[in-house]
Image: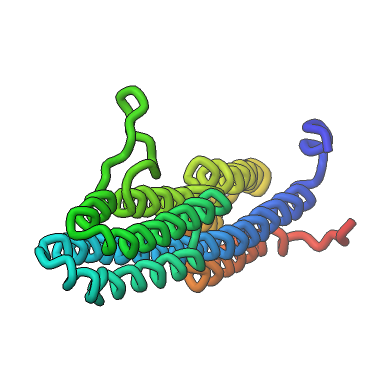
Amino acid sequence: MTGRGLRDSHPVVVLRRLRAGVLGVLAVTTLLCLVAADRAEAQIAASERTQEAVDDIRQAHEQATRARAALEAVSRIDDPVSISLTGVGADFANAAARISSHLTSATEGNGAGKRGLSHIQFVQGQLATSVQLADAAVLDGAPAVGKVGEALHAAREHQGRQDVPFTGGLEQSLLDLQRVESDAKRVQLESDWRDRRLLWPLFMAPSAVMLLLVCATCRIVARRFRRYPSPALVLALLATASVCVLMCVLRPLDVAITLPVLAAAGALTYLAYRPRLAEYRFPRS
């Protein structure tokens, strides 16, 4: 309808359309809240799984330091016969087995996609190689075992002034892998339906539209009906705006709070328009 047509319409017709507009905004806001809450909860659940992967990798790194300590202990044995009989020792074997187990668990919670899976597989291969080198070094004596232990703690290679990830020993690679998964978790928590850059305009738009509709309603009621605007309509606007702000701040707001508040806003809206519309008995067109 054109501006002139709106001015020429009977105020009751205008109020009905404004009421429909406000209720429509409330419906859209409710739908947005439900979708945002559902998707945000899915992202939170994914980030929790990724955090479990981060914890597994951290524990794998702890076991890697124990594996290195076990090899260092073997390297201090002076008797070559004893080394050949005991091998790398139960401590190293147990630590290596735990590393493998933690990496397998981390695969299940991997949040970095194909990139994260590729890095996990690389570290698993690095672990298998380290175990093979340690078993072979036993035949060459204590110094060889010590070198394998040092290799587990090797630093990254450099490219200019920057370190190159996944170019160090097993311990450093596990730290690199932990960083990859931690970055993935941060992305999960800050992207899509938990991204404030998306949420603020998405939820403020309905609030802005509702504000315009309420202002238009107040003008019609004051000029055409010679009445003060209903406080219930202002309360409905404030309730809706509060929900929208909290959805952006809390990311997300619990739907157990959202739905009752928006339902109350809808009831207040209906009650706010009812007295003026009840003054006339025109048939709906």
Question: Which one is nearer the viewer's eye here, 182 or 228?
Answer: 182
Residue 232 can be seen in this image: no
Image location of residue 75, percent across then percent down: 16, 60
* Residue closest to the eye, 259 or 87: 87
> In the figure, 207 relative to 266: above or below?
above
- Quadrant location, the C terminus: bottom right
Q: Residue at x 60, y 64 (%)?
A: 34
Judge by depth and name the residue closer to the eye, 12 or 180.
180
| Number of on-image labels | 0
Q: In the image, what residue occupies the spot 30% across and 75% down?
A: 94
Is residue 140 among the parts visible in the rendering? yes
Q: Residue 162 placed where, x, y %?
A: 33, 29
> Compared with residue 103, is residue 251 higher up or lower down, i.e. above or below?
above
Residue 63, picture quadrant: bottom left
Q: Residue 108: where, in percent of width, then height?
A: 51, 68
- For the point 25% across and 76% down, the residue is 90
Image quarter where the N terminus lies is top right
- Residue beneath the point at 42% across and 61% down: 128
User: What colour-coding does the image apply?
Assistant: rainbow
- Percent position of residue 58, x then y: 31, 61
In the displayed orientation, state which residue is furthest to the front.
81
